[in-house]
Image (spheres, rainbow, N blue to C red):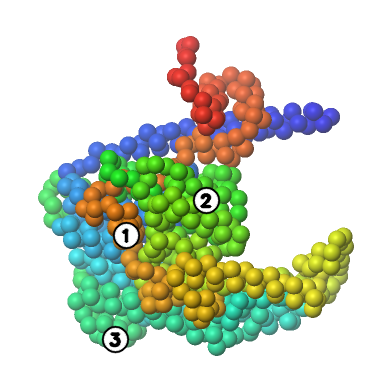
Amino acid sequence: MKQFLITIAGVFVGLLLFFVAIPILLIASVIGAASKGPDIPAQSVLMLDLRESLTDQAGSSPFAAFGGSGLSVMKVVTTLHEAEDDERIKALFIRLPEGGMPPAAAEEIRGAVKSFRAAGKRVVAHSQGFQPTGVVTSTYMLGAAADEFWMQDTASFQVTGIANEEVFLKGLFDRYGVVADFQQRHEFKNAANPFLYETFTPEHRAATLSWMSSVYDNALLNAAADRRQSPQALRAALESGPMSAPEAQVRRLVDRLGQVEFAEETLLDRFGDDAETLEFDDYAATAGDGGGDSGPEIAVVEAEGAIVTGTGDTDPFGSNANAYSDDVAEALYKAAKDDDVRAVVFRVSSPGGSDTASDQILAAVQAVQKAKKPVVVSMGTYAASGGYWISSKADAIVAQPSTLTGSIGVFGGKFAIGPALERYGVNVENVSVGGEFADAFTSERAFNPSERAEFSEFLDRIYQGFITRVAEGRDLSVARVNEIARGRVWTGAQARQLQLVDETGGFYQALATAKRLAKIDADTEVDLRRFPAQKSPFEALEGLFGASAASVRTLAAAAWVFGDPRAQALLDKMAETRLRADGATVLESARVD
């Protein structure tokens, strides 16, 4: 019976592979063939739609686009860098989102837009309105960097400031008997505050208003400079309240009014009858990675999302939700061992995560440095808590002025829901064997005094270790780091003043710093190599299905059941991939047609 069930399971997996995996691979093959890109018209206008979901980094999986738009900040800035020197690309047309953009992402793309304009290319931005959501001021700042700022004439202009909302659950928890038993290091580490308090603590409010003011002031300064207005005049115009598009034009907040189609046609007309629009993704597929193809090599290693232990091989769609410590560390170690690599630019966009996972990655950073290769961190939207941990010992740190960083602290605890569930007739009862601490994290009850004391010592050790690493990496005293840490979030601009960051700027600023530290002439073109390289469709699915002999046998069964040459070809390819990974030399497969 057991063998029968195993056989049935194998057939089921085989069917899944045949009807799901193989079609996906065929689609990916088509995508791969198309990725060589269309012919680029001699008079091209790039069309960049920022209304799509935007990550900081491109996923390493060839199926990343299936999980979202596939558009990333890094893809935008490196593609625009390539387009600067492409004579076929005459202009850029940007469609702005109605809501807010991550401030650091808007700053990075703004820098790329200004560099594109400095190369003699024209930029037009179009908005279908600005809604009062979060950090919409940053979206406006990006639009202000264009040569012409268009707005749909019937749209609403609501760019009046920055808002941040917290939902405090303490009163609800008290009502139903839920105990949030958390500890934080220290008073500014406010991640658990919504569970512990009914309103902002003074420290929570002060820190939040501080970073929000820094982000807002920077957006106003940038937009005012691009709109050729004083910051005071621009602030007064924006904060005067919601207004119509015609009113925004009268106040010199936008240049022209019209539907998006009219704005596109007007831009195309500037370049003659032969001008054509070109989708950004299509051009990006033809462009390189922003570097040369024969110069000194600089590795680019990326980490986006929550920092966790393990590997992302089981996530073939590359959602960028997590930065897996095994994967990031392996990429850094490979860069350290590669004799052709002269330096590493480590792109970090993470709000934090596991301390052990963070320390694994930091150890890999130090391995690169021991190999006599400088490591320069380029911070994205945020590099806070664990994101700062993995950055702290780099040779240099470059952040956008509005990057959220710091948060040098730790928190932890549990929810005790036993008393709450008792009210509904649910009994949570725990049994354990071992030491007194074995059942400390049961949800049945809150910590007892001895458990709370032990857990407090545990958090103290992590916090002190974090402080020590930052002090060593930033060449600061432990006392000074403890003073500016305490869990507080800083913007990149603030962090630079505190010596937590060396420079403000984006990826190409970090690249310039890496070249300087590696003693590569500033004018020398470098070859950027991504570690790890993007996986092939076969490698991505191999990871999903375990890359095991069992999965190969299952696929073989599917090929036998259906007698389909596509399945057999996939089997051959997987076997070849496995052999190459094991170091074998594989000759071209013999074919009998």
Secondary structure under the numbered disc 2 in the rendered image: helix
Q: Position of residue 351 (x, y in %)?
A: 51, 65
Residue type pointed to by label 3: Ala
Name, please, the residue furthest toward the bottom: 202
Look at the numbered discs 3 and 1 and tell me whether their residues touch, using CB distance below 8 Å: no
First-in-chain label (3 vs 2): 3
Residue at x 36% of width, y 42% of height: 340
Q: In front: mark 3 or mark 2?
A: 2
Look at the numbered discs 1 and 2 and tell me whether their residues touch, using CB distance below 8 Å: no
Residue type pointed to by label 2: Ala
The vertical placement of 425 against 574, above or below, is below
Could you say which disc has been placed on residue 329 in the image?
2
- Answer left or right for 184 relative to 574: right
Q: Residues within 10 Å of mark 1 (few under 14, many from 20)?
A: many
First-in-chain label (3 vs 1): 3
In the rendered image, which residue does mark 1 sit on?
513
Q: Nearer the viewer, residue 451 or 323?
A: 451
**Residue 19, picture quadrant:** top right
Q: Nearer the viewer, residue 360 or 52?
A: 360
Residue at x 44% of width, y 54% of height: 369
Residue at x 68% of width, y 32% of height: 12
